[in-house]
């Protein structure tokens, strides 16, 4: 089961890197690029929630949880940083700010996940699920 999750994280990391290139760290995001960023963050949050639930239930090792959450956190952090400096057309600015805010929260939650207690992992799973729903 662990290799499946690991390869999913690598695919997501590549997707993040490609979408971040479109962002250009302060570049102007189109509606399509903003939608892609939102879907990427939604996927990271959902995968993090699954990891948190599995870890809290004892279905993954502590090392796997720590390493995988670090991978997810790095990808989320990269995207969050790009979104914080991105520009878009005025009508999309509220959506960009909402996605950037949720991306920062997802990144922070994923960073905490690797060293969280079982109780905190359960709480983080709920927070990440809520963030994923907010990114739809």
Image: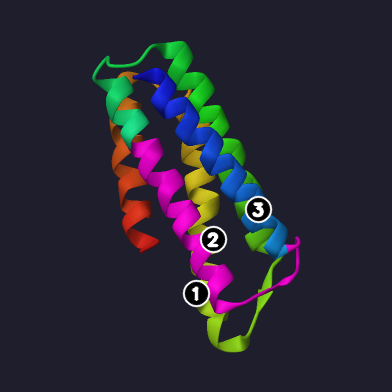
Contact? badges 1 and 3 (CB < 8 Å): no
Is residue 135 found inside the magenta-colored segment of the image? no
Identity of the residue drawn at 32% across and 34% down? 50
Does the rendering let one see residue 77? yes
Q: Position of residue 47 (x, y in %)?
A: 39, 39
Is residue 37 found inside the magenta-colored segment of the image? yes
Q: Position of residue 91 (x, y in %)?
A: 55, 88
The kind of secondary structure element at disc 2 is helix
* Disc 2 target residue: 37
Direction from residue 98 to residue 28 in the image, left or right: right
Split into 4 quadrants, where in the image is the C terminus? bottom left
Nearer the camera: disc 1 or disc 3: 3
Q: Which mark is residue 114?
A: none
Is residue 117 or residue 8 the one in the foreground?
A: 8
User: Compared to 135, does 127 lie above or below?
Assistant: above
Give the main secondary structure, helix, strand or loop, of the magenta stretch.
Answer: helix
Does the rendering let one see residue 115? no
Identity of the residue drawn at 23% across and 20% down? 57
Mark 2–mark 3 distance (CA, rounded to whole Å): 10 Å
Q: Position of residue 59 (x, y in %)?
A: 28, 16
Mark 2–mark 1 distance (CA, rounded to whole Å): 11 Å
Q: Position of residue 107 (x, y in %)?
A: 53, 43
First of labels 1, 3 by sequence position: 3
Q: Which mark is residue 18?
A: 3
First of labels 2, 3 by sequence position: 3
From which residue to which does the magenta span run?
Answer: 24-49
The kind of secondary structure element at disc 3 is helix
Find the residue positioned furthest to the left.
Answer: 57
């Amino acid at each position: 089961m662990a290799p499946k999750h690991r390869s999913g994280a690598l695919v997501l990391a590549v997707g993040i890197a490609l979408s971040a290139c479109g962002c250009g760290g302060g570049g102007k995001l189109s509606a399509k690029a903003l939608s892609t960023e939102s879907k990427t963050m939604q996927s990271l949050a959902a995968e993090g929630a699954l990891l948190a639930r599995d870890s809290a239930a004892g279905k993954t090792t502590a090392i796997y949880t720590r390493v995988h959450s670090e991978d997810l956190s790095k990808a989320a952090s990269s995207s969050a940083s790009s979104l914080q400096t991105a520009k878009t057309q005025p009508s999309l600015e509220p959506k960009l700010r909402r996605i950037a805010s949720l991306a920062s929260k997802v990144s922070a939650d994923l960073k905490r996940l690797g060293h969280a207690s079982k109780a905190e992992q359960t709480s983080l799973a709920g927070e990440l699920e809520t963030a994923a729903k907010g990114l739809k």
